[in-house]
């Protein structure tokens, strides 16, 4: 690990967790925002339409790596309910902000994360690269949890236009850190976007399994399944002490 000069981190289930009830609470806030904006909707019917719309858009993302955004899901769900509303309508923007406000209440740092970041920042440049559709909400979460200052660069798929494992987002991380790809470690929990994606452009991936190993309850994404171990294998850590030991090995 002597050649490592920087560390990139994933966010969700790597540095932070989101409580299981988050998505249900977020949808409730989204729905209430739309009702306050004057839409006449039946909640169960809209919920099903919104979920289907999200699944359709996320499935398209998996084909070419282009990021989607919640405003398109909401617009399509409203169309299903008889409202032809542009994704850029301010009422949809308000609903998006209401949806993500729930994350601030239910996101928490994985124990020891602050100390770990403070420790490794003394020796390495740090970057963050996360898949998240709405950039402003991701930045609010980072600020709320107090970890923004640790990173010299913060990259969010919703602002980049592509999501992991697309090579362009990892190459952007390399560019922002100003190093060779082989000099950067990338730590993430999801083998497909994190480990495979990092490896494709020459970063050195590390698989963190804290959430899985400690059976931490978390909010599962719409298309989230059980991860298969990375193939070929990558170094695996279950605690931040494991990472520090790996770096010092």
Image: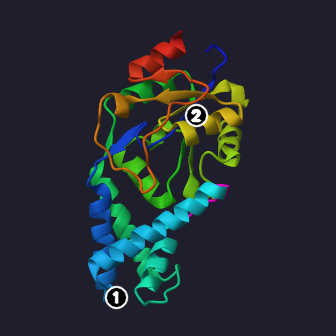
Q: Is residue 37 above or below residue 97?
A: below
For marks 2 and 1, the one nearer the N-term is 1
Q: Position of residue 146 (x, y in %)?
A: 37, 43
Q: Residue at x 73, y 29 (%)?
A: 180
**Is residue 67 inside the magenta stretch?**
yes
**Is residue 153 inside the magenta stretch?**
no
Q: Count all numbered tags in the image, as a single digit.
A: 2
Q: Is residue 3 above or below residue 116?
A: above
Q: Please tell me which residue lies in front, 234 or 140.
A: 234
Classify residue 205 as left or right of residue 149: right
Q: Residue at x 71, y 31 (%)?
A: 202
Circle 2 residue: 195
Q: Position of residue 195 (x, y in %)?
A: 58, 34
Which image quarter holds the N terminus?
Answer: top right
Q: Report whether residue 224 is seen.
A: yes
Q: Residue furthest top?
A: 249
Circle 1 residue: 39
Q: Is residue 235 above or below residue 14?
A: above
Q: Residue at x 71, y 40 (%)?
A: 175
Q: Secondary structure at mark 2?
A: helix
Q: Report whether residue 160 is seen.
A: no
Mark 1 crowd level (few <14, some 14–19, many ≥20, 10 Å Cα): some
Mark 2 crowd level (few <14, some 14–19, many ≥20, 10 Å Cα): many
Q: Residue at x 52, y 50 (%)?
A: 131
Q: Which residues are magenta?
A: 64-68
Q: Position of residue 114 (x, y in %)?
A: 37, 32
């Amino acid at each position: 690990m002597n050649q490592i000069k920087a560390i990139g981190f994933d966010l969700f289930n790597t540095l932070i967790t989101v409580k299981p009830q988050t998505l249900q609470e977020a949808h409730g806030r989204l729905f209430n925002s739309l009702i306050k904006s004057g839409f006449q909707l039946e909640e169960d019917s809209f919920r099903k339409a919104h979920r289907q719309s999200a699944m359709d858009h996320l499935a398209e993302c998996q084909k070419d790596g282009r990021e989607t955004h919640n405003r398109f899901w909401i617009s399509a769900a409203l169309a299903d309910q008889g409202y032809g509303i542009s994704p850029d309508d301010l009422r949809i923007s308000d609903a998006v902000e209401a949806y993500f406000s729930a994350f601030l209440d239910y996101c928490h740092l994985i124990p020891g994360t602050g100390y770990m970041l403070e420790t490794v920042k003394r020796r390495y440049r740090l970057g963050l690269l996360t898949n998240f559709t709405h950039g402003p909400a991701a930045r609010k979460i980072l600020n709320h949890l107090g970890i923004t200052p640790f990173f010299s660069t913060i990259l969010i798929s919703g602002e980049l236009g592509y999501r992991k494992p697309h090579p362009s987002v990892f190459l952007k991380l390399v560019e922002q850190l100003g190093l060779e790809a082989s000099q950067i470690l990338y730590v993430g929990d999801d083998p497909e976007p994190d480990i495979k994606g990092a490896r494709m452009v020459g970063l050195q991936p590390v698989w963190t399994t804290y959430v899985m190993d400690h059976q931490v309850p978390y909010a599962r994404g719409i298309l989230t399944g059980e991860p298969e171990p990375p193939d070929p294998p990558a170094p695996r850590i279950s605690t931040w002490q494991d990472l520090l030991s790996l770096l010092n090995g």
